[in-house]
Image (cartoon, coloured by chain):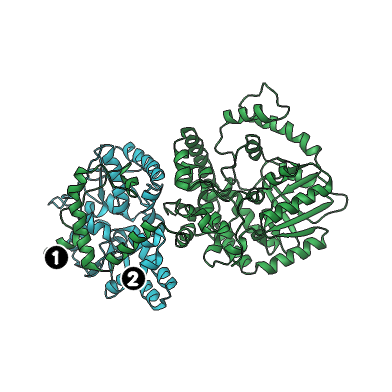
Chain colours: A cyan, B green
Amino acid sequence: MRIALFVTCLADTMFPEAAKATVRLLERLGHEVVFPAGQTCCGQMHINTGYQARAVPLVRRHVRTFDPYDVIVAPSGSCVGSVRHQHALVARRGGDERLASRAESVAGRTYELSELLVDVLGVTDVAAYFPHRVTYHPTCHSLRSLRVGDRPLRLLRAVRGLELVELPAAEQCCGFGGTFAVKNADTSIAMLADKMRHVLSTGADVCTAGDASCLMHIGGGLSRLRTGVRTVHLAEILASTEQGGSPGERGELVVRT
Amino acid sequence: MPATAPGGVGQLRGEEPFPAAARRALADAQLRRNLGHATATIRAKSGAVIAEVPDWEQLRAAGSAIKADVLARLPELLEQLEARVTAAGGVVHWAADANEANRIVTDLVRATGSDRVIKVKSMATQEIGLNEALEAAGIIPVETDLAELIVQLGDDRPSHILVPAIHRNRAEIREIFLRAMPGVDRALTDEPADLAAAARRFLRQTFLSTSVAVSGANFAVAETGTLAVVESEGNGRMCLTLPETLITVMGVEKVVPTWRDLEVFLQLLPRASTGERMNPYTSMWTGVTPGDGPQAFHLVLLDNGRSAVLADGVGRQALHCIRCSACLNVCPVYERTGGHAYGSVYPGPIGAVLSPQLTGVADNASLPYASSLCGACYDACPVKINIPELLVHLRDQVPHPRGESVAMAAAAYTMDHPALFAAAQRAARLSRLAGRRGRGLPPPLSGWTAGRDLPEPPVETFREWWAKR
């Protein structure tokens, strides 16, 4: 199958390993991945911070870029959620009905990685190997906006060598919330503290999720506490095999004390 | 555009923005323990009894549909309600805002000659600051709901819609009673049964010696002019039946078309709010009945910004709210910051959308941002108010700080030009070096590095890697 990669601005800039892993994984499963030129950002930051009019050109760009493809994937529940639930609304509010209906069409062909694998490609065992104790944080937008359900867990359970441990209070928000983490930094950090406490209580050495943004937040907290627990995107775990391709040159964290 | 709720009266506006008020709450370890314990307990109870109902999702959809219908023909239903209440011997008053409602109620109480009223727990009267208005007129309001009484005696403010004293534990309550409850036994312990008995002794005296009551209403049935209050303690029923005069203050959105509609809400409300299958007391009254119950009944229909909310096609769904507080109990922000941080009698997620709409967003500009948009509130809402959608909608109306506006415009322009975007990515990578020297990000981004490390940009962006493939 020919699959268009919607990389997301955050993965492109800060977490390319998650996007590269998505490419490696899909190619290993025998699919062709294309990277449509001209893509930048879905506009979620603008929409959620209160700048919907500013997001209209970004929605237009996104729709124009991805309209030619039948199947689109992103390694981010949050950005897929924005495409699915916000793009048409923003276009309609901007008075562009034609854009809104095209956005709905693109949204109907856009999948978060675990959705693509399980629902479209029909696989739960992607022949991965990742010999670590792992706990999974569901992330709010994957959980409630997309309702990915247990798809990521089914994928993780099929990974060789991986010991999956349940995260207590998994469904509670980690406190990232985009600009919330900056506008309400104290509250965000209080939420993060509880999330980290739960992650550490599992004894896992890796915390994974389907969203680079939440992992950036949780990973930033774990790094500050020097816990040694790593955050790794779900795509990187699924792309890992005994032959290699395990999480490698991910951006290290700058430790500021 | 209809008028919003007036300033200087009632309790819909905080004195400081949410982040500042939240910071103080976050530093209060006792408050966080009280809240964490209480919300977790209610969540578990509520979750268990909701799981018993096989058609919960259909009930939610029905509740939402009834409310949407009510809002679509509100004037017609209110006129029908007025006609039926009048025909049943009640008197209907229309209050455009808090000032008018307070004046109407104060005048009505004065006309009875009583200098004291007993009150049924009511969010509408909290919203308009009725107690303060009555006190200014020399009339003593006595709250009869146990938690409201604790708040009143403690000279405090409610911090939860359903559990106004959720921020207090029993040791604190004992101290409040010893300090402020008339005639309290000095040997009072902090056992819940002992505390409840003390309140009961005090309230009984008050019930039997007060001739005027003020209530709110959970529902009003247009087809018969019937008002309804649901409660757990029985104090409400005492207020609704013992006094000679009953004055009910009701937000206009509380009307429902028919008795049949109550069936849906009387299932949704207790399970979502207190985690009970049925609330212990449901009191209903229609006008006056000679020789039985209050012989004078007044209904004050309160707007106070509701017409302005109704005028917003997206925002109006906040008026679906049946004040169950399920959204508060699942909200990770509420759980850690408490109700006072929201600065309004409506805290939590519903407060973050309702308060700014009632006052106009400029007066509560920080509230739509008091959420991580995690969506737990939407899932919990028994009438399916899409609170995350509403928050985003309101953020679009907030007056934005100039620096942020400029930055957002620049970011949007950059992202709409891929070559510029790639250049910005390269610039971010250059900050690797700067980052090693720095001690965190500059304001307004310093909030990030206050408690988290920032990942370093990688040596190569994805698109650079792809181009070389």
Q: Residue B264, percent across and down? A: 62, 58
- Along the line of sight, the residue nearer the viewer: B245 or A172: B245
- Along the line of sight, the residue nearer the viewer: A133 or A139: A139
Tell me if B277 is positioned left or right of A178 in this view. right
- Above or below A66: residue B366: above
Q: Are marks 1 and 2 on the same chain?
A: no
Q: Residue B352, percent across and down? A: 51, 53
Q: Could you tell me how far apart the alpha carbons at marks 1 and 2 are, in whole angstroms? A: 25 Å
User: In which quadrant is the N terminus of chain B drawn?
Assistant: bottom right
Q: Residue B16, percent across and down? A: 50, 46
Task: Look at mark 2 in the image and give the residue it sits on.
Answer: A57
Mark 1, chain letter? B
- In the displayed orientation, state which residue is furthest to the top: B187
Residue under the image location 74 percent in, 42 percent down: B118
Q: Element under label 1?
A: helix
Q: Nearer the viewer, mark 1 or mark 2?
A: 2
Mark 2, chain letter? A
- In the displayed orientation, state which residue is furthest to the bottom: A98
Amino acid tagged 2: Pro
Q: Residue B249, percent across and down? A: 71, 53
Please tell me in which quadrant of the rendered image residue B149 appears. top right
Task: Look at mark 1 in the image and give the residue it sits on.
Answer: B467
